[in-house]
Amino acid sequence: MQVTAEGKSGNRTATKFIRKVAGMEFAAAVRNGNRVVAPLFVIAALVLVSAPRTSAGRNPGSGHTDPQSGKVELLHVQGDVYMIAGAGANITVQVGEEFVIVVDAGLPEKSQEVLAAIRSVTDKHILYVIDTSADEDHVGGNGNISQAGWALPNTSRNPVVSDEEKFHVQTGASIIAHINVLNRMSAPTGKVPLFPEALWPTDIYDNRYWRLYNGEGVYIYHPSRAHTDGDSYVFFRRSDVISTGDIFTLASYPVIKAGQGGSVNGLIDALNQIIELLEPKANEEGGTYVIPGHGPICDRHDIVEYRDMVTIIRGRIQYYIKQGMTLDAIEAARPTLDYDGLYGATTGPWTTGMFIEAVYRELSSGNTQQEQKAGAGR
């Protein structure tokens, strides 16, 4: 269920039915040791609904929809939680009893519109900004959003400056992220950092989770490897909303940044962790809502489908690897065919081919445990 004015795209339901038929054909062929030859109507239908999107209007920094093509929009999710779309990555806003928590800050050129959207629902000060990764469309607005807030006196950027100004602190909300985000945004002495210091996290954690309280429990969880090795997802307990960052996004196939510790196996593990926290209201719909890194508000049904998609494609690629097929041969076999209409792209910063290659490189390099896990997806 999508909690927005727009419903799911028209081809999503059609694709679900067609890929079910195609999946049965694939499974039957594998069991019988035969070549996979789908009926002509399945092939024709898949071509119609699975035509990959082009990259027009995409943001080169992330591989997702370009925010410049749309306006900044604030949507109430449920409880104390809102979503802001159109500013780069989706931004989550929790308006608690005492202050405001913002998850991801979007792009810097959209910051004034983001702040105006927040001020349209509350005049409480922003106390925390939480980064779910080090991607530019998530952290680019850190400085602007932080400086519009108010900081606690024990943060590294905002110390008590002197006895005469004993209780005076400079403006600036605390920026929270996993330590690997800080490591990636900063640089060793003598090196040029990827981001200016004003955007760096001021408060970091290096364990499995961090907890806050703002009228409800706010849990920040870290999966060891997913989109990158610095991801966080945030669970607002009473509002019953989870903000996932780019661990889950409907705008493309998963962006697996292997050079930053990303892993398809770790991403599936992270999706399973998130699914365990989701409680549907009825028939897998409603209940706990999910704010993805990009795309509309979702529920358990949507993220389960996404997890299943990644698992199935991983299993297919592992099967082809076991058959001794090269990367070129696997790409020609189109293991993503029945999902390309929803997530595929032939050009741009993150294409279907790049996703297939990322999965192939990880599984073909790997160990027995990876193969056993991936084989289950077939």
Image (cartoon, helix red, strand yellow):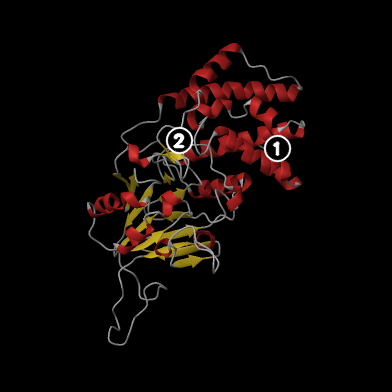
* Residue 370 figure quarter: top right
Question: From the viewer's perspective, is residue 52 above or below residue 212?
Answer: above
Residues under labels 2 and 1: Cα distance?
A: 29 Å
Q: Nearer the viewer, residue 173 or 240?
A: 173
Residue located beneath label 2 in the image: 283
Q: Is residue 156 visible?
A: yes
Instruction: From the top left corner, tell me how far across and down residue 262 is, in percent.
Output: 59, 49
Which quarter of the picture shows residue 318? top right
User: Quick one: quadrant of the N terminus?
Assistant: top left
Residue in the image at 67% along x and 41% along y: 361
Horizontally, residue 315 falls left or right of residue 260, namely right
Is the C terminus in the top left, top right, bottom left or bottom right quadrant? top right
Direction top: furthest residue: 40
Residue under pointer 1: 375
Along the line of sight, which residue is nearer the eye, 279 or 377?
A: 377
| Circle nearer the N terminus (2, 1) | 2
Q: Position of residue 146 (x, y in %)?
A: 34, 62
**Element type at mark 1:** helix
- Against 112, residue 192 (above or below) is below
Say which of marks 2 and 1 sits in front: 1
Q: Residue furthest bottom?
A: 163
Q: Which residue is located at x 31 percent, y 73 percent?
A: 170
Instruction: Count the marks.
Output: 2
- Mark 1 residue type: Gly
- Please indicate, yes or no, whether residue 378 appears anywhere in the rendered image: no
Q: Are circles 2 and 1 on residues that touch, CB within 8 Å?
A: no
The crowding category of the residue bearing disc 2, from other C-alpha atoms within 10 Å (few below 14, some 14 to 19, many at least 20), is few
Q: What's the residue at 28%, 78% (across, down)?
A: 168
Secondary-structure class at tag 2: loop
Image vertical order of residue 333 relative to residue 145, above or below? above
Q: Amino acid at mark 2?
A: Asn
